[in-house]
Amino acid sequence: MNINIDIPDEMRVYIEVQVMTGTYNSIGEYFLDLVEQDKKRKAQAKLEMLLLEGINSDAQEVTPEYWQNLRNQAIAHQRF
């Protein structure tokens, strides 16, 4: 699939320099890296949101019994 986008000359020159200096092998590789970085950034933001949600939720004391119960539940769900 081909995608055509219009970008300002200043950005085009910057991207071409990245390719010429060996940072990327092609303009396509540059854009693929941008997409991958965006995916990672969104995954990180989601993780941070979930962590904050957990921090701000009602706390449950984590004891050895808690972990054993959690293990037992996980094992029970693995059985067919």
Image: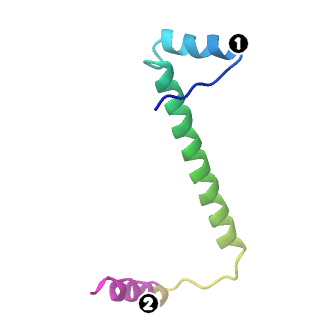
Report the residue marked by disc 1: 10
- Left or right: residue 72 versus residue 62 is left
Q: Which mark is residue 66?
A: none
- Left or right: residue 72 versus residue 19 is left
Q: Is residue 16 above or below residue 70?
A: above
**Residue at image coords 66%, 82%:** 59
* Chief SS of the magenta region: helix
The C terminus is located in which quarter?
bottom left
Please check the rendered image and state whether residue 68 is part of the magenta-colored stretch, yes or no: yes
Question: What x and y, as percent, mark residue 44?
Answer: 59, 52
Of residues 48 and 67, which is closer to you in this image? 48
Question: What x and y, as percent, mark residue 56?
Answer: 72, 73
Q: Is residue 30 above or below residue 10?
A: below
Q: Secondary structure at mark 2?
A: helix
| Mark 1 surroundings within 10 Å by alpha-carbon count, few (fewer than 14), some (14 through 19), many (20 or more) | few
Q: Secondary structure at mark 1?
A: helix
Alpha carbon separation for disc pair 1 and 2: 59 Å
Q: Amino acid at mark 2?
A: Asn
Residue segment shown in magenta? 67-80
Question: What x and y, as percent, mark residue 35?
Answer: 55, 37
Q: How many marks?
A: 2
**Residue at image coords 56%, 12%:** 16
Q: Is residue 19 above or below residue 40?
A: above
Of residues 56 and 26, which is closer to you in this image? 26
**Which quadrant of the figure has residue 54?**
bottom right
Residue furthest left in the image: 80
Q: Amino acid at mark 1?
A: Glu
Of callouts 1 and 2, which one flags the residue occurring earlier in the amino acid sequence?
1
For the residues labelled 1 and 2, say whether their Cβ atoms are less than 8 Å apart. Answer: no
**Residue at image coords 46%, 86%:** 64
Of residues 30 and 50, which is closer to you in this image? 30
Q: Which mark is residue 69?
A: 2
